[in-house]
Amino acid sequence: MKSLIIDAQIAGTSGDMFLSALLALYEVENKKTIADKKRQEFINTIALKIIQAAALEKEAKIKVKIQHKNLNALEGLNLHIELSEPHRHLKIPQASSILEKFFTLHTMSEKAQLFSKKAFKILFEAEAKAHGESLEKVHLHEAGSLDTFLDVLGAASLLDQLDLFDALIYILPVALGSGTVTFSHGTLPVPAPAVVEIVKKYQIPVYSGTIKSELLTPTGAILIASLMSVCKNSVVKNYPYITIEHSVAGFGTKEFEKTPNALRLILGTSIESDYPQEEISIIETNLDDCSGETIGFLSQKLLEMGAKDVYLTPIYMKKGRPGTKISVLCFPDEVGTFAAEIMNQTSTIGVRIINSNKLMLKREIKEVQIEIMGKSFNVHAKISYNKKGEIAHFKPEFDDIKHITEKTGLTINDVVSMTREQIKKKL
């Protein structure tokens, strides 16, 4: 499955950075001169149609110059945008009208149109919430400029061209920045109120970062939020398992000392398309002064509490003392619960936390009816599939095997053998 990693860990992102990075992916396999020509033609067309959709042919001008940039070993594109337009306070009906007229001038898929509408809806809602106004009354200042339409509609068109609306999107933590930002509402702390509302409502993973500047702009935030709304996505702390095909960067206009002001996009194929993947945590502790009864009781209780797995490993500790390592598998947000239970029930004074990713075969449980000694039984079969969709393994649920054994008087081995044979025929 095609996958896109959005890596804004260092310098966050803005609308022009996102657009620049997508342009770098566009025609990336062509020769540089041919690719640049097609990119320029593409962005010029988008800019012209935006002006036409806004009915500002005689009053506005958008000139976009695409520049190649290589900074700190990171290579990509930077957009130099010259914009002249009349001052306006844009409200929702005006923005919607511009979008609808643009859609009649430029062919876009339904997902691209939905993405564009969603982006502006998110922006207006965030501004309304931040300023305590209704959606009917709220208007945009800087964010209502034509370059916001260029960022959103240009990104939507490129995502469409690159077939990324059907891709799996991975979002790494986005740098917010720090310090203050000055705009039409005055000087405020970073992040700006609208950005706070967007990342809160759409659960964009963020952190402050190391640069003292505004790194995530409202336009950058709405592009990520809109993409998360219309595409299959996964928030990740580290790079996922993918086969990388292209890595590009979109540079912003600010310059930071020793740090590239760039958004990196990585395009590839996700292993998750073949094997499901999930984040898990492993909680471990070593015990050499707990009774076997206590450890056995704890293991059972942890499973009853919902641990994905609990296993015990015999070990030798200091001075050759025999001990037991308890290992518990759980989801990352459950670590606190299971760690507390281990420390409450045993003599340990601490546990180790290991965060990891797990690749799995696709699996399901099917209920199968079988017949043994003239009696019918329902057995739950655990079935796993390989990447071709073929059955890789299957096994009957042990509790069902135990039940049949008790009802028939047969041995466990006999019941397993007969059950597997009948399940195999039915599958």
Image (tube, rainbow, N blue to C red):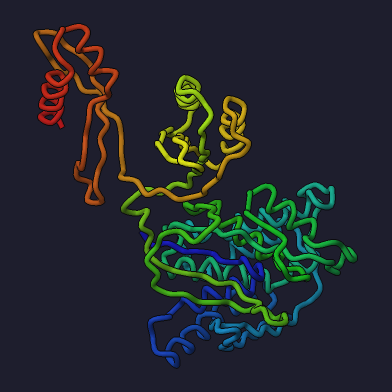
Q: Quadrant of the N terminus?
A: bottom left
Percent position (x, y) of residue 36? 48, 88
Does 393 sit left or right of 155 as displayed?
left
Which quadrant of the figure has residue 7? bottom right
Q: Nearer the viewer, residue 321 or 274?
A: 321
Q: Nearer the viewer, residue 341 or 241?
A: 341
Q: Residue at x 10, y 29 (%)?
A: 425
Q: Residue at x 56, y 36 (%)?
A: 334
Q: Residue at x 69, y 72 (%)?
A: 146
Q: Nearer the viewer, residue 312 or 201?
A: 312
Which quadrant of the figure has residue 50? bottom right
Percent position (x, y) of residue 180? 84, 66
Q: Quadrant of the C terminus?
A: top left
As drawn, 157 above or below 172 = below
As drawn, 167 above or below 407 = below
* Residue 83 appears in the figure: yes
Does 170 sit left or right of 58 as displayed?
left
As drawn, 241 above or below 200 = below
Residue farthest to the right, as pictured: 186
Percent position (x, y) of residue 311? 41, 34
Percent position (x, y) of residue 222? 65, 59
